[in-house]
Amino acid sequence: MQKRFVSIWFGHLLADWQLIRRPELAEVPFVFAAPDHGRMLITAISSVAQRFGVEVGMRAADAKAICPGLEVLDDKPGRSLKLLRGLGEWCVRYSPIVAIDEYAKDGLLMDVSGCAHLWGGEKKYLKEIISRLKSKGYSVRLAIADTPGAAWAVSRFGKITPLIPEGGHTEALLSLIPEALRLEEPVLIKLQKLGFYQIKSFIGMPRSVLRRRFGEDFLLRLAQALGTEEEVLQPLQVPVPFQERLPCLEPIKTRTGIEIAITRLLENLCKRLQAEGKGLRTGILTGYRIDGHVVQVAIGTSGATHSVSHLFKLFQLKIDQIKPALGIELFVLDAPRVDDAEVPQEAMWTAKPGLDDQSVIRLLDRVAGKVGLDVIHRYLPAAHHWPERSLQVAVSVTEKPARSWQTEKPRPTELLGRPDPIEVMALIPDHPPKFFIYKGVQHFVVKADGPERIEREWWLDKGEHRDYYQVEDDKGQRYWLFRSGHYGENQKYKWFIHGFFA
Amino acid sequence: METKSELVYKLKQDILLWQGYKPVSVATTGQIGLGVIENAFPGGVFPKRAIHEFITVYSEHAAASDGFIAGLLAVLMEGGAACIWISTSRRLFPASLRTFNVAPERVIFIDVKTEKEVLWIMEEALKCEGLAAVVAECNQLSLIESRRLQLAIEESGVTGFILRKDARKMTSTVAAARWQISPLPSNAEEGMPGLGFPRWQVDLLKVRNGNPGSWVLEWAGEAFVDVAPLKKESIWSERQDRKIG
């Protein structure tokens, strides 16, 4: 199908917006100005001001000189973009793909392929958009053509008709001025100097000549307007490809009803996902209540899945959060994030299941759904000797350790999150403690191993090194103690307990 | 005509069968590596489809229970199976599991805030057949809750370990065994300075259909090794008197 694009140009976007808010300005010439290098530069003008010869980019003082009684209003940066975004979201009713014109930032581009016939043809379609926007107070110019570039050009500079028929966009471009190609300022000046006042005077030139004189960007813009190069629009609202809707005849307010609704939605969605070899990663269930409120719950999975029973279990944990009040009349299930599902291989042999086992992944999904994802940890060895940093949290369930675990040096079975200071009697300089007091209990050391010096990683933090000792007291309990730094410095606590051995 | 003792033996076997202890043939006997301690269990086999309770009287002894469980996990997790460790205040240092032949990257730690969540996750995890074992640190466990856990295990066959660090909150449960592990002075090799292998006093306080007992065990780098029991007058027995439960 031939693609069709509409370009909407808001000639006086900010001025129109201001007039909607302050109708008393209708007869007054006014401009918007913003400070730039210590002077006020005009950023937007009203149509009345335009009649006086005021232009965008003038100094506000100069404009006041040629147009007495000119109102200068402050412009906020980003205001026009915000306005455009709002208008673009409103325009989604005409086409699902609406994008902001990135070149001039004063218009919208829409991909309307297959949309116009819903309004009874392109002519009526354009008329509808113009009249609706005009009734809101925005003066706009529209054009429809086969390429976004051509539509953009015709909407701004076209003089004959805004409706460019299929395949007619090259012809429509011929008589337009070079500015219609969305070119950079230096290129435009160069074209002007060389006497190219219309597109037709250079469109037939060899590409190599044009590239040498005007650069690659010029050729790209030309190709985009002619349709030989595809232009991708960045839609304001990314359409959700996986969505299921379930309107209800009677408003639903029971738990059983909601469960049935979820099952129905999941069955349809999963059938689609399975057919396309996809799996759900995040799902959002939206319930539209009859009192106008919207209730929403979301689930996430750690691996792409299209299993109805598993997804249903995840939603089941969330049903308590859905408040139906007077009843829900429409359920919508979105899958904003889908991934390629892995097709499980049938196992011919019976090996013990590991971490990547489906049942384990589903269990973790359920735990994450109920308690939260941040409670689940899996640790891999990290390249640090410092005990607190010797572990790193694995990112995914299937991540393999990059290095082997260190077993040469003794590490305690239980490690205290923060070393506890202890009182110690030890021979200097580097003997293990003879005896220590931890939590008010005396421990007489019978056996000891060490010291194992662990230097502090000075590029990460400052402080003393640690000399670790593995000691066993007279009761048989084994501890991991360390002395921080050397003796002889003014520190209150020099000895700490950091862990317990099995 | 059967003799009386044969009849009693047969009846005992039947009772065991009804209680879920499957008679295991010698060929498939899953040795857990506990040596003589396994004889304390019915049929001389460590019950894998059951809950094992570990009591810690002194908080500093918890590391001994951790080490003992890790030694059991090493056998249960053979062949790449995974394990879940649920806790509210975990002190276990994952890197140390390597000492007990457990691959720390195959242990999934779930650190939650309340014991209620611990029990919920444990029940869900015990239903999951893809796991080798589930360890939960949980002080409060009522009879009903433990029965729920046992029912979940009977479906899936996952071994459950419960670490109870507060001996005052002791209640009766349906656990297959109640253990108490306390550290003992290690014994270095002849004339060598420093510490030897970790050595524990293993008390089996309760065993369903088995014989409770007391042993001395050592983790000798690769496996558990039974050690001849120490004499009564050694130092650790003084603590033994003050023991609760």
Image: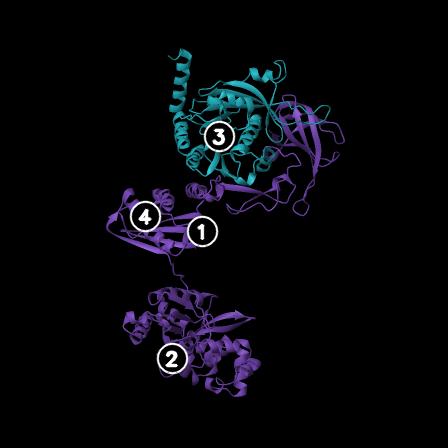
Chain colours: A purple, B cyan
Q: Camera-side residue: B108 or B72?
A: B72
Q: Quadrant of residue A209?
A: bottom right
Q: Report the residue marked by disc 2.
A: A167
State the CA–CA distance, disc 1 to disc 2.
44 Å
Tag 2, which secondary structure?
loop
The first of marks 1 and 4 along the sequence is 4
Residue A413 spot, x, y in % from top left: 59, 32
Same chain, labels 4 and 2: yes
Q: What chain does mark 2 sit on?
A: A
Q: Nearer the viewer, mark 3 or mark 1?
A: 3
What element does badge 1 sit on?
A: loop
Could you say whether the residue bearing mark 4 is in a helix, strand or loop?
helix
Residue bearing the label numbered 3: B28
Report, in whole angstroms, how far the alpha carbon at label 4 lies from the one at label 2.
48 Å
Left or right: where B202 falls relative to A326: right
Three-letter code for the amino acid on which mark 2 is drawn: Gly
Chain letter of mark 4 equals A
Q: Amino acid at mark 1?
A: Glu
Q: Viewer-nearest of labels 1 and 2?
A: 1
Amino acid under disc 4: Ile
Residues under labels 4 and 3: Cα distance? 45 Å
Residue A262 - label: 4
Q: Amino acid at mark 3?
A: Thr
Chain letter belonging to callout 3: B
Q: Which mark is residue A445?
A: none
| Foreground tag (4 vs 3) | 3
Residue that label 1 marks: A342
Q: Position of residue A37 (x, y in %)?
A: 56, 71
Residue A322 visible? The answer is yes
